[in-house]
Amino acid sequence: MSASYFVRQQLVCNRTWKAASLLVPGLLICSFASAAPQPRRQEQHFKVQAHPVITLHNPNGTITVKAWTKAEVMVISNRASDDVEVDAEQMGNRVDVSTHAASDNVAPEDLRADYQINVPEDAELQIHNDSGEVNVANVLGDMNVETVAAAVDLEDSAGYVTIKTVGGSFQCTRCAGKLEISSISGNLRLTDIHSFHVHAQTSTGNILFSGEFLPNGLYRLKNYSGIIEVRFSPADSFDLSATSLKGKVINEASLTPKAHQQHFYSRFGNSLFGTFNAGRAKVELTSFDGTINILKRD
Amino acid sequence: MPEAEAIRLAQQGNAAAFERLYRLHNRRVYSLCLRMVGNTAGAEDLTQEAFLQLFRKIATFRGESAFSTWLHRLAVNVVLMKLRKKSGTETSLDELTEPDEESGGPRRDFGGPDLRLSGSIDRVHLQRAVEQLPPGYKAVFVLHDIQGYEHNEIAEIMDCSIGNSKSQLHKARMRLRELLHEATRDKAREDRKAASADSGGED
Amino acid sequence: MALMTCRAFLNDLRLRMEGTPSLDAEAHIRNCPSCRHITEDLNAIHSAARSWRAEEIEPPAHLWASLRLQLEREGLIRDDRGSQLELSNSGWFSRWFAGLPRPALAGGYLVLLIAVAFGFSRPANRQANEARWLEGTQVSTSPLSAQLTAEQVSFASFNDSNPAVTASLNKNLAIVDNYIALCEKSVQEEPQNEVARDYLYEAYQQKADLLAQMTERGENNR
């Protein structure tokens, strides 16, 4: 049986409630409390089974998701105003959370909610946050994050991660699994990566990749302008193709040139093709007029 | 369209609902089939067959188990039937055992270098080794170690006990260990031959 | 206390799988290199297989077409309404058909597909002159460019309820427009440059994506 929770907005004012029994002091305290804006905090818990799905739609705010060992999803929300409502519903093994305006005339700074969510580590996340921040740590399930201007920060993820931002930056540390990231102007920073499939694309942002090139892994980094920087270690093994149509390619890897070069990008721009060690992974770096740096890791 | 709604509409023959269910599960089923048979043509046929069976029987789905578990059970059965037909045998899962590995202690590898696997498992070799496993071992290994199912889920999918699932998995891993050691020894032998051929000397 | 034998250790390993070893089993591993090697090898195999776990492979696109044909033949499809897939939580790009005028934009999208196919095609005659390449690219992209420009005019005063979103979408639309202009210039200078053509087609795709988002927000804000 699935439970369904519907949250109504309430003004949390413990001091008011406790002081109700006092006369003048109580009135004084209450009037003091209501003069300053009060946080609107709610906490809900949902029991779930293995591999729950959590969806979150939020216009603006800070979202922090962490994994814990309980078979439960905890949602703590903080609304910026009474003009905003938070809905949290459970349908089977899925928890849907959304923020929406309660009236037609909401000031932009009020259309905001911050979330702190704890989930089982095998949870699947679908997050849509237009602006603010999204921080996710230690969640190993699949993830889809879409944003316009929010900065996205992942740590220790392991599933199939797809990130779409327009202008928000993306940072991923110690992530495994499969990563697909696209942005227009956001910077992408991937460090201590242990993933077999990385596809990262931004138009005017920079891309930094520092991690392992796993055997049979595929690593595609592409931008229009800006810097693509890849750091390798002597033990890595990859087949490299790097092309910048109008920019530079700077390389510190000792590559074995290919006997036959049939790559169709090779005729234009500044290109570099070759094999490092046994060439087990495939690394493709492409830029229109940016600089591509292939550097040794310190 | 949520999955529950897609199931309901698919039971009425709605095309978009069929497609929705296909899109939700096609990668997992195809990955399973590909890892079991080792080639894309076979995996495509099996994936199509699994979904066909699913859609033919969808009217009978009453929600007693999770839809994905039901689908994966169908897919595993389709794959196992195909593999058994190919091997010409009709053995049950419980009978799919190798010559007894449980007598005495672990095998002793005599001669040759210490061929430890840790840190040196090549994916190509592991894939080849998995392809050589008997169907029952392969199914449990793919479902547990690669696809990530728990033993209780495998027991439900393959209609066996949890203990049986664990036992088959252990045997699968032991067999893979032997196959990988053989591959490592073969490669070492070839490298030695190539080295002596280059130097013009004899072993 | 009797020490655990190798047979007992392997039996224990089989029963507990990835569970925590008992004290006896730990003591046996310390003293028995062979069983220790076996345990390490099995863990290595499990880890190697586990690294494939997140790798779900996409089947080829024709599989659904073939399946659907079979479903129709068997009469399992009885209701073809809404045959275009509607996804409740789909990505922005896959929703852009819903947001924009379908008949007009479908034509533009088809042109873009043809342009991409044209861009990746290998002309039988590798010595086709540059004018033909340029003409081919322009024939493919001009109608779409005009369509997207017309759509963009209607967003001249785009204003989302979230100022950060408004600013970001407008700024990035300008970035993509600049990107398109530079790519077009590059294609004009080197018509056979596949890299420049690829970037140009991707830029159009990004622009369509952005406009689809703005359309959707514009409708939601009415």
Image: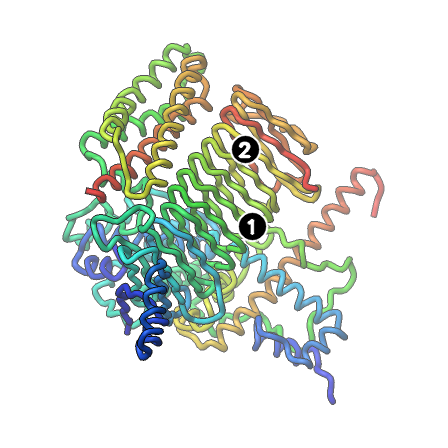
Q: Position of residue B35 (x, y in %)?
A: 47, 55
Which is more foreground, mark 1 or mark 2? 1
Can the viewer see residue C59? no
Crowd around label 2: few <14 · some 14–19 · many ≥20 (10 Å)? many
Q: How many marks?
A: 2
| Quadrant position of residue A234 | top right
Q: Tag 1, which secondary structure?
A: strand
Q: Amino acid at mark 1?
A: Thr
Q: Position of residue A128 (x, y in %)?
A: 36, 50
Q: Position of residue C211 (x, y in %)?
A: 29, 34
Chain at tag 2: A
Can the viewer see residue A163? yes
Dot label at residue A98: none
Q: Is residue A139 left or right of residue B60?
A: right
Q: Is residue B86 left or right of residue A86?
A: right
Q: Amino acid at mark 2?
A: Leu
Crowd around label 1: few <14 · some 14–19 · many ≥20 (10 Å)? some
Q: Residue at x 83, y 38 (%)?
A: B200
Q: Which of the image's four quarters has the C terminus of chain A?
A: top right
Visual colour scheme: rainbow
Q: Residue at x 39, y 56 (%)?
A: A114
Q: Position of residue C147 (x, y in %)?
A: 25, 25
Q: Residue at x 57, y 69 (%)?
A: B171
Chain at tag 1: A
Residue tagged by mark 1? A173
Q: Tag 2, which secondary structure?
A: strand
Residue tagged by mark 2? A285
| Quadrant position of residue A84 | bottom left
- Which of the two discs, 1 and 2, labels the residue nearer the N terminus? 1
